[in-house]
Amino acid sequence: FFYSLKKHTHICIWTTKKKKGECFDYVIKCVGQDIHADRLWKRYLTFLKKSVGAKSGEEIDRIRRVYHKALRIPMDNLEQIWDSYVLWEQNTNKDLAEALIDVHREAYNLAQQVHKDRKRYRRGIILHF
């Protein structure tokens, strides 16, 4: 299943931006909750930021929604996504940044705590793939 999704995202490289966005949406829907999904979220956010040309309000809101969704998922390297989000918010709208960062800090902290708990539980489990 993972191979199929990986192949699916590589196919997206050769498609239009709209199709590539749909591919990312599909893959995020399928495996975005995984503890190791951090690279996927980072790639998706990078894609969205690069594809935003004029930085319209609608495109900024989409990036913001993706960040907010990612920050609620207990996954590896979430602190890197948080740092990226804080920097992006500050560069996008300084007036709004502080309020939004404060609002989402609690969800981020909760996701970090859940991630630590999950790692502790997984430590003793041998996973076979």
Image: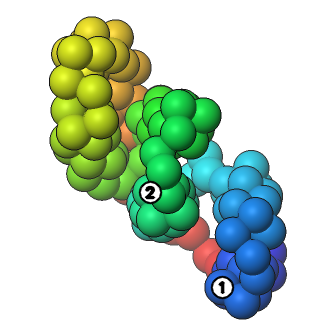
First in sequence: mark 2 or mark 1? 1
Residue at 22% x, 15% y is: 95
Q: Is residue 14 at all visible to an observer of this figure?
A: yes
Q: Which residue is mark 1?
A: 13
Residue 102 place in picture, x, y as percent: 25, 12
From where the camera sits, is residue 45 visible?
A: no
Q: Would you identify the image quadrant in which residue 8 lies?
A: bottom right
Q: Which corner quadrant of the image does residue 23 belong to? A: bottom right
Q: Which residue is mark 2?
A: 49
Contact flag, marks 2 and 1 (Cβ < 8 Å): no
Decide: is 59 above or below 94: below
Q: How many marks?
A: 2
Q: Is residue 58 above or below residue 8?
A: above
Helix, strand or loop at disc 1? loop
Where disc 2 sits, the SS reads helix
Identify residue type, mark 1.
Answer: Ile
Q: Position of residue 91 (x, y in %)?
A: 22, 39
Front residue of 9/59: it is: 59
Mark 2: few/some/many CA within 10 Å (<14, 14-19, 20+): some
Front-most of residues 88 and 3: 88
* Residue shown at the point (30%, 36%) measured from the top left: 92
Quadrant of the image for the N terminus?
Answer: bottom right
In space, the residues marked 2 and 1 are separated at their CA atoms by 16 Å
Q: Nearer the viewer, residue 83 or 54?
A: 54
Q: Amino acid at mark 2?
A: Lys
Front-lying residue, 125 or 105: 105
Please state if 120 lies on the left or on the right of 80 as rendered: right
How is the rendered protein coloured? rainbow
Q: What is the x, y in percent for residue 31?
A: 67, 57
